[in-house]
Image (spheres, rainbow, N blue to C red):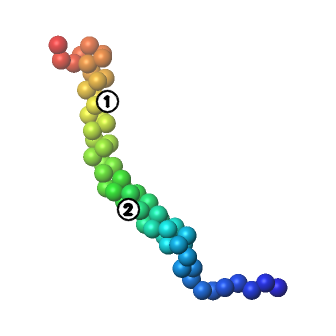
Amino acid sequence: MTQRSNHRQTTSKAIAASAESARAAQLRNTLLKAAPAIASIILALVLITSLTSAGVGFV
């Protein structure tokens, strides 16, 4: 039977992994907050370009 250490890892790899995880979580939160604005801009662009391409838009 093997033993397993219950001590926390304090190596540089563990510290780097936790920092990377924190950056990924922060980026995810930022993108989720910006998602409605990005979706609104894309929707406006699609509506404008679809109307003008159909010949119904601005002359």
Q: Mark 1 or mark 2, which is nearer the start of the sequence?
A: 2
Tag in front: 2 or 1: 2
Q: In the rendered image of this protein, does residue 46 appear above or below residue 25? A: above
* Label 2 sits on residue: 26
The residue at the point 56 percent across, 83 percent down is 8
Q: Residue at 54% of width from left, 79% of height from top? A: 10
Q: Nearer the viewer, residue 26 or 53?
A: 26
Q: CA distance from mark 2 to mark 1?
A: 30 Å
In the picture as drawn, the residue positioned furthest to the right comes out as 1
* Residue behind mark 1: 46
Name the amino acid type tagged 2: Gln
- x, y percent for residue 9: 57, 79
**Label 1: element kind:** helix
Give percent across and percent down for residue 53: 30, 17
Res 40 quadrant in image: top left
- Left or right: 55, with 9 as reference point: left
- Tell how many labels: 2
Disc 1 marks a residue whose amino acid type is Val
